[in-house]
Amino acid sequence: MRTVISLLAVGLLTACSTTSPRETMQRDVDQATAIVERFQAIPEQSIPPSVIKASRGLAIMTVTKGGFIVSGRGGSGVVIARLPGGGWSGPSAIGTGGAGFGFQAGVEITEFVIVLNTPAAVDAFAKGGNVTLGGNLSVAAGPIGRSAEGSVAVGAAMYSYSRSQGLFAGVSLEGTVIGTRDELNRDYYGSNVTSTDILTGRVRPPAGAQRLISLLSKY
């Protein structure tokens, strides 16, 4: 069952939207691709390539700050997993909202990349429902920049990064709740798929996801 936080996220993101669920999902996939490109544009302030190469998956989101529900924050994005053969799964839709992200006071839009370092971190998203960052799955601000490349060692189940108004940083997202958006997945894939089906590679990624997959295949 979804929590109130997940429902608030969906409401914030869709209340004024006239686009179809499939178009909404494609927009999030395209935005995820652009976020990864922007995060890697400045090597000195980027996610070290070795972190992505060693990852088991990525959760990529855009969070918008508003002022009309609860804390007035909601976000959407996708999670994508590395498959046993080294390729990447299709994207699965995720959303967040309500309390949390307190560090971004005054920020309107923030982009996040959460690096999933362990199989357990991917499994948490593959099970559907809600994932609470922290607790059994530790989340920490990730190492930054090319200078960290040679000394990176996995110290948490997840690393988190943010980019807002051109400023890039590793951040802590302890306690943040992220929910699976099953209705978007069903529309995007054209069948009653689950997040497990998607993230384990049981279903073929739609053509609209190929640009994101090709970009991540470089790592």
Image (cartoon, grey):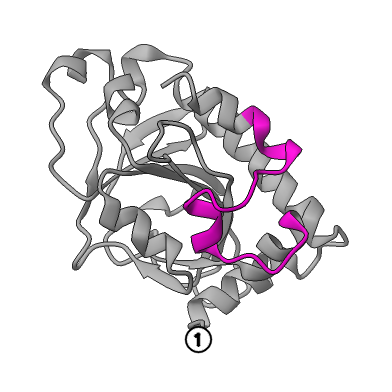
Relative to 170, 66 lies left or right: right
Q: Which residue is drawn at 56% across and 63% down?
A: 74
Q: Residue at x 20, y 13 (%)?
A: 147
Q: Which residue is drawn at 39% across and 59% down?
A: 101
Disc 1 is placed on an element classified as: loop
Q: Residue at x 37, y 13 (%)?
A: 43
Q: Position of residue 198 (x, y in %)?
A: 55, 54
Type of amino acid at the residue the image marks with label 1: Met
Q: Is residue 207 a member of the stretch shown in magenta? A: yes
Q: Where is residue 113 in the image (x, y as percent from the top left)?
A: 42, 41
Q: Is residue 55 a member of the stretch shown in magenta? A: no
Q: Position of residue 16 (x, y in %)?
A: 81, 66
Above or below 182: residue 205: above
Quickly name the residue at label 1: 1
Task: Using the rendered image of the protein, determine whether residue 99 is visible from the camera's viewpoint.
Answer: no
In this view of the protein, which residue sits in the foreground, 78 or 218? 218
In this view of the protein, which residue sits in the foreground, 204 or 97? 204
In the displayed orientation, state which residue is furthest to the right: 18
Q: Which residues make up the magenta segment?
A: 189-211
Occupied quadrant, residue 120: bottom left
Relative to 130, 139 lies left or right: left
In this view of the protein, which residue sits in the foreground, 1 or 100? 1
In this view of the protein, which residue sits in the foreground, 179 or 200? 200
